[in-house]
Image: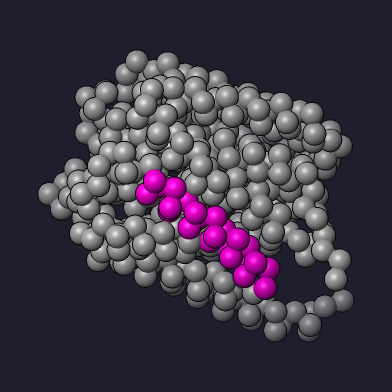
Amino acid sequence: MNQEKMPFQVWILTLAAFAIGTAEFVIAGILPQIATSLSITEGQAGYLISAYALAIVIGGPILTIYLARFNKKTVLTGLMTLFIIGNILSALAPNYHLLLLSRVIAGLVQGPFYGIGAVVATNLVSEKMAGRAVGQMFAGLTLANVLGVPAGTWIGLEFGWHVTFCVVATFGAIAMLSIFTSIKSTGHSEAKDIKTQLMAFKNPMLLISLAITALSWSGFMTLYGYLAPIAMHITGYGESAVTWILVIVGFGLIIGNTLGGRSSDKNLNKASMFWAIAMVVSLIAVGLTIDNKLLFVVAAFIFGITSFANVPAMQLRVMNHGGEGQELAATANISAFNLANAFGGFLGGMVLDSQLGASMIPFAAIIVPIIGLLFIAKANRNEKSIKTSTPIFAN
């Protein structure tokens, strides 16, 4: 059987996703250092996650509507330039409020980049490879967690957290040059007007798909964003151990992303339900093993697998229902992911600074994803009934 190869340009998008993903998630590793350095609580440092995520939620769709009319190569290059500026400002930030502002600037890039990039990636391959192309691009996010976040954490420990952001900006520059030299200018469709794109949101299935992402994903950042304080204050690991714990969890994310892409191409409905349940179970497992050094790391690794196995299914479901507004739908889904990240950042920070403490974070993390399961069940039922009724109305 002839295996279709993944085009080189998709790998370039993976590199850019790696830089952007590292910028978003690296706070998880350097959170205790930022808190100490700026004389704030770890919960307040966690709100840097929420600020970045909210910039994506609000800025992403607005920027995408505006940028959809332009040449995709120019747009992706311009977005990476803004990303570099945001991270240089983070590196130079002398206080909490300016760091917060620089995070917002860097965060504006992620929604439109992933949304437009995902459409570019699917256009580069045949339909049967669409799930894998999106999965491949999002593998940049998983790699960010395996390599970028632990490396950024280590750099932060050795040289200070400011240097971490300098390195992230450098990766952004490499990605920008690669996009500029390798992605063809012809890779953009004629601009669809704003009204046409917004009409896609009249489809209730698209709205349910976005709700699934926002609800089911919220458990991820509630735990992941606070793995460092949990490992240090509850499980009893030293500061230097956080780096390799993040590496192990990151490997779980890569495995999950691969399994999720393949299972979504096979059966999207079954895959989305299975992985969403698995993630809830894994969060409970982390909570129950929090006092045991070995079991905690094993449970966190499994959490990594189950959480990222959800990503291709969520993105593909939204793109399937995006209709004429596929780019805006894909970007809205990035907003949904980050609404979940912002909520997770707030929830984890509140629990951490409260009397409950870090050990309750994994249990707090399951509340919203359980509601997400109900939405997945509803979406699966609706899609089943649409499929069975389609032949009657077919031309």
Quick check: can you spot residue 121? yes
**Image side of residue 107 versus residue 238, left or right:** right
Which colour style is shown?
one colour
The residue that appears at 63% across and 37% down in the rendered structure is 16
Magenta span includes 268:
no
Q: Residue at x 53, y 61 (%)?
A: 256
Q: Position of residue 200 (x, y in %)?
A: 67, 55
Vertical order, 41 against 289 (above or below): above
Residue 108 x, y percent position in the rendering: 54, 32
What residue is at 60 percent from the left and 45 percent from the top?
Answer: 140
* Residue that appears at 32% across and 48% down: 227
Res 184 → quadrant: top right
Indicate yes or no whether the magenta region holds residue 250.
yes
Viewer-closest of 358 and 113: 358
Number of numbered tags placed on the structure image: 0
Q: Nearer the viewer, residue 174 or 129?
A: 174
- Tell me if residue 83 comes above or below residue 221 in the rendering: above
Q: Give the magenta-colored segment's residue range.
A: 244-266
Q: Is residue 259 above or below residue 249?
A: below
